[in-house]
Amino acid sequence: MGERFYDDLGRMVLRLTLGCLLLFHGFAKLGDGGSLKWIGSQLASAGLPEFIAYGVYVGEIVAPLMIIAGVYCRIGGLLVFVSMLFAVLLAHSPELLSLSEHGGWALELQGFYAFGGVVIALLGSGRFAIKPD
């Protein structure tokens, strides 16, 4: 097996890791209408229309499914990045330069999702995908 095989395998592992872990957050929001209302209120207080809150479903359900399947994976990665930017700016900006009680960055989860999305957007899906790019 050549180097390209392992590169593509690594892309697939990254896609599955990021996509599956983020998808849990999206499914949790489907069952909790309060989350969507809270996101809408945060958007409204920032001067943005509340309907943009539905974008959380794009960023946490549609994009992860695109990434997992490897269908327009680069676009899915960008959608995850944008979704995480909104999450950080609307809900976590006070923690941006903070450490957790265990000494790690307070936003390491959001950082993993955001920068994982960037990496997927840059690398693409690899050949182990429904629609390799």
Image (spheres, rainbow, N blue to C red):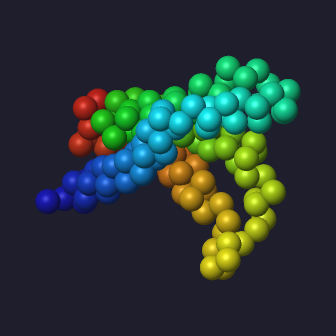
Quadrant into which the C terminus falls? top left
| Visible residue check, residue 113 | yes
| Visible residue check, residue 76 | no
Left or right: 102 in relation to 76: right
Quarter where residue 23 is shown: top left
Please tell me which residue lies in front, 123 or 42: 42
Please tell me which residue lies in front, 29 or 5: 29
Q: In this view, does 12 lie above or below 73?
A: below
Percent from the top left, x then y, of residue 105? 66, 69
Q: Is residue 47 above or below residue 18?
A: above
Q: Residue furthest bottom?
A: 102
Name the residue rendered at 25%, 32% in the picture. 130
Name the residue rendered at 63%, 74% in the picture. 104
Left or right: 63 in relation to 114: left
Please tell me which residue lies in front, 59 or 38: 38
Left or right: 92 in relation to 10: right
Name the residue rendered at 32%, 55% in the picture. 13
Percent from the top left, x then y, of residue 11? 34, 51
Percent from the top left, x then y, of residue 28? 47, 42
Quadrant into which the N terminus falls? bottom left
